[in-house]
Image (spheres, helix red, strand yellow):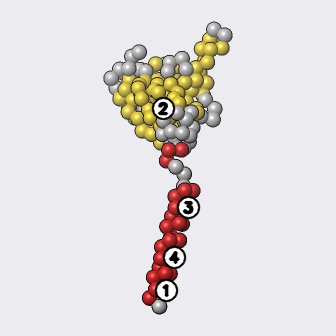
Amino acid sequence: MRSRRISRVGTLLFLGVILVLIVAACAPSQSASPKIVIENVWARPTRSGMGGKVTSAAYMIIKNEGNEPDRLVGAMSDVAEHVEIHQSIMEGNVMKMRPVEGGLEIPAKGQVELKPGGYHVMLIGVKQPLKPGDRFTLILEFEKSGKKTLQVEVKEM
């Protein structure tokens, strides 16, 4: 009787180990997901623009060190009424800014640079003037990586 009980316990342990291995193999790998790293974050001092509203723009390098793409889908900050992801586009001899529809893809093992004359985070209706040396919080929202909170320094560049 004792050997039968040991045999049952051994079988149950063996099946439990197999089940754990199957579940672990089916679980998504951490290395397959995006891994967002944000560097060189800065913003311009405020200026008038966009229908008389006070504006600024934030710039940075967004790197994805993971094996899966991600998408920057939104941004927010307490310093502005609206925060949008924009792209500057040259149409003829005129530089125009447009919101990026559907978000900005950050490729796997790649990066996107937000810089003057290109992609940027537009701060519209800035509530108080932003001067060189000031700092504020900016939150970026990614489709897969969630929210990332940044400290942005205002610089004259």
Q: Residue furthest bottom?
A: 1
Q: Amino acid at mark 2?
A: Lys
Q: Are the two marked residues, 2 and 4, in contact with CB atoms closer than 8 angstroms? A: no
Reading the image, the residue beneath label 1 is 4
Secondary structure at badge 2 equals strand
Secondary structure at badge 1 equals helix
Dot placed on the residue nearer the N-terminal end, 2 or 1: 1
Circle 1 residues within 10 Å: few <14, some 14–19, many ≥20: few
Which is in the foreground here, disc 2 or disc 4? 4
Q: Position of residue 59 (x, y in %)?
A: 46, 25
Q: Residue at x 42, y 38 (%)?
A: 149
- Label 2 vs label 3: CA separation? 33 Å
Between 51 and 8, the residue placed more toward the observer is 8
Dot placed on the residue nearer the N-terminal end, 4 or 3: 4
- Label 2 vs label 1: CA separation? 58 Å
Q: Position of residue 68 (x, y in %)?
A: 56, 40
In the rendered view, tell whether residue 39 sits above or below residue 6: above
Which is in the foreground here, disc 1 or disc 3? 1
Dot placed on the residue nearer the N-terminal end, 2 or 3: 3
Q: Residue at x 35, y 20 (%)?
A: 132
Secondary structure at badge 3 equals helix
Reading the image, the residue beneath label 3 is 22
Reading the image, the residue beneath label 2 is 63
Q: Position of residue 148 (x, y in %)?
A: 45, 39
- Label 1 vs label 3: CA separation? 27 Å
Reading the image, the residue beneath label 4 is 11
